[in-house]
Image (tube, grey):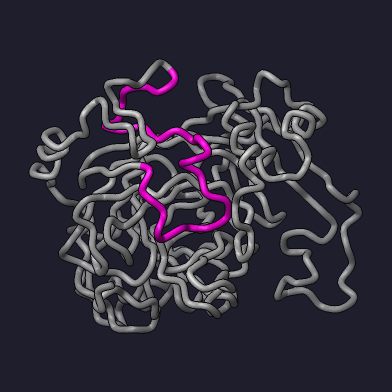
Amino acid sequence: MSTNRPVYNPEAPAFARLQFCFALATSLALATACAPAADQEEDGATPAAEQTADQPPEADHFVPSTPENLNWGWFPIEKEPVLRMQSGETVRVNTLTHVGAGQNEDPVRYLTSLGIPRDEIPQDVLDFWETREGRPREGRSGHVITGPIHVEGAEPGDVLEIEILSIETRVPWGVNSTSARGGVFSTSYPGYAEGDPALDIPPGTRHVIRTGEVDGREVAFFSDDIQVPLAPFMGILAVAPDPVVGQPGVTVPGVQGSRPPGPLGGNLDVKDLKAGTTVYLPVFHPGALFYVGDPHGAQGDGEVSGTAIEQSLTGTFRLRVHKDGSITGPRAENDEHYILMGIDLDLDRAARHAVWEVVNFLVEEKGLTPAKALSLASIAVDFRVSEVVDLTQVVSGFIPKDVFLR
């Protein structure tokens, strides 16, 4: 592996400028010229020419959530890619929620007992569940993750750009879990103190939440009197990591558990990483090896119960490789904001890292002095607690684009 790969250090000097917008005419031309032949199926993906009504030909490639394309709670480094694609091409990816796919009980029995009709259970859930016994579990978490996708030309030290083109629901239901000692009320949560009261919630409480369209927008029917706007996003957007035992989520050599986010991206659970947003991740391995999963229908900042509306989704992405910039961890942007993230086991440290990343960005990208950058961070930048329940915690700094006149 190359020795010039980025090392996660939020307090290091800012790296070379990362350009957020690129005219990639050359890459797009290559996408057409280098598309795989229609009979090339050994990578587990379906060529666009063979896509059916359930696989809209909106992208250059399609990756279904079949068992061979799924991983359970980790990001394998040596796994054969489910797809090889050119930089600048698009890919449509099916993902599965872990609800119904990871429990010991038969998925049909389990999900129908929650009130989910049999005909609303994807076959993918049943097929994955049948492969559970053959999958390694030590050091792994519970997420079901699709990938990896190999992007030609990506090398350690590069940046992978993930343009989120669309996120769509696959089923009209999702599940949220609550418990007396779950999420921020867990006895293992850093903010717990001996003697803290527990909520009066029956063990194993699962809330099945129906979703559908009302007046032209998708909503979650939380109750007869409450409708929550649906805002689907992928909780996990990741590249293959470079795990070291002792790092968060790494207890087995070579195995990065999917629970904690980190430099690879991973289980960020940042609800703003939805359609119309572009995410940037550092590359640690040839091909970048892109993973996506932990699909959510809606979530509040914090994800305080430990889960969102866990709902199977389909995402369409454009993946690009950038050679002229390096970053130490995930960042993003949309039409309104640059989004810089701080990640740490400690929420206070995560906030500090987020501010440091914002200041570095303003110095490198906007030419401010550190003093002016910190001043602007304090008067114009919103720092949001994106998630607090996945071991490492995420604080995101939202820099408004409209304050910059040029």
Tell me which residue sits at (34%, 72%) in the image. 328
In this view, the residue in front, 406 or 105, is 105
Q: Quadrant of residue 61?
A: top left
Tell me which residue sits at (61%, 48%) in the image. 134
Quarter of the image where the C terminus is located: bottom left
Question: Is residue 10 shown in magenta?
Answer: no
In this view, the residue in front, 159 or 405, is 159
Where residue 231 sits: x, y (%)?
A: 52, 39
Question: Is residue 77 shown in magenta?
Answer: yes
Main secondary-structure element of the magenta-colored stretch: loop
Q: Which residues are magenta?
A: 54-82
Tell me which residue sits at (14%, 37%) in the image. 34
In this view, the residue in front, 140 or 190, is 140
Q: From the viewer's perspective, is 327 left or right of 301? A: left
Does the image show residue 400?
A: no
Where residue 372 sits: x, y (%)?
A: 30, 79
